């Protein structure tokens, strides 16, 4: 997957979890949880959806690497390069 495909997938997953998510002023380098008012369950839902769709195992200690859209893409890019 390309960086843009990963970004689109992440935004799609977030939109499915939070149908009121507003991406119009999203700062790719600011924490997603703060910008989109995601709680810890929403965050876990995102991780679980990535696991379900792509058979990814994301260890809990690596969750901080999923804080911003940019860091999510950078973290997932090598894991999804062959998808």
Image (cartoon, rainbow, N blue to C red):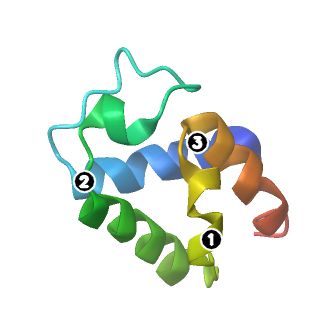
Q: For the view shown, which residue lies furthest in the front direction?
A: 61
Give the distance between the C-alpha atoms of the residues marked 3 and 2, in whole angstroms. 20 Å
Q: Which of the two residues, 34 or 10, is positioned nearer the viewer here?
A: 34
Mark 1 neighbour density, 10 Å: few (under 14) some (14–19) many (20 or more): few
Name the front one of labels 2 and 1. 1
Q: Residue 7 carries which label?
A: 3
**Nearest to N terminus: mark 3 or mark 2:** 3
In the image, residue 32 above or below residue 80: above
Tell me the quarter of the picture where residue 41 sits: bottom left
Mark 3 neighbour density, 10 Å: few (under 14) some (14–19) many (20 or more): some
Say what secondary structure mark 3 lies in: helix
Name the front one of labels 3 and 1. 1
Say what secondary structure mark 1 lies in: helix
Residue 8 visible (yes or no): yes
Give the distance between the C-alpha atoms of the residues marked 2 and 1, in whole angstroms. 18 Å
Q: Residue 61 carries which label?
A: 1
Q: For the view shown, which residue lies furthest in the top direction?
A: 25
**Nearest to N terminus: mark 2 or mark 1:** 2
| In-image side of 5 versus 40 (left or right) | right
In the image, residue 38 above or below residue 16: above
Tell me the quarter of the picture where residue 1 sits: bottom right
The residue labelled by disc 2 is 39
Residue at figure coordinates x 41%, y 63% from the top left: 46
Residue at figure coordinates x 58%, y 42% from the top left: 7
């Amino acid at each position: 997957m390309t960086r843009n495909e990963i970004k689109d997938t992440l935004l799609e997953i977030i939109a499915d979890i939070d149908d009121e998510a507003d991406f119009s002023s999203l700062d790719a380098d600011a924490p997603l949880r703060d910008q989109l008012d995601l709680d810890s369950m929403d965050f876990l839902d995102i991780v679980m959806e990535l696991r379900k769709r792509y058979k990814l195992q994301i260890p809990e200690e690596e969750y901080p690497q999923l804080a911003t859209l940019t860091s999510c893409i950078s973290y997932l890019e090598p894991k999804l390069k062959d998808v």
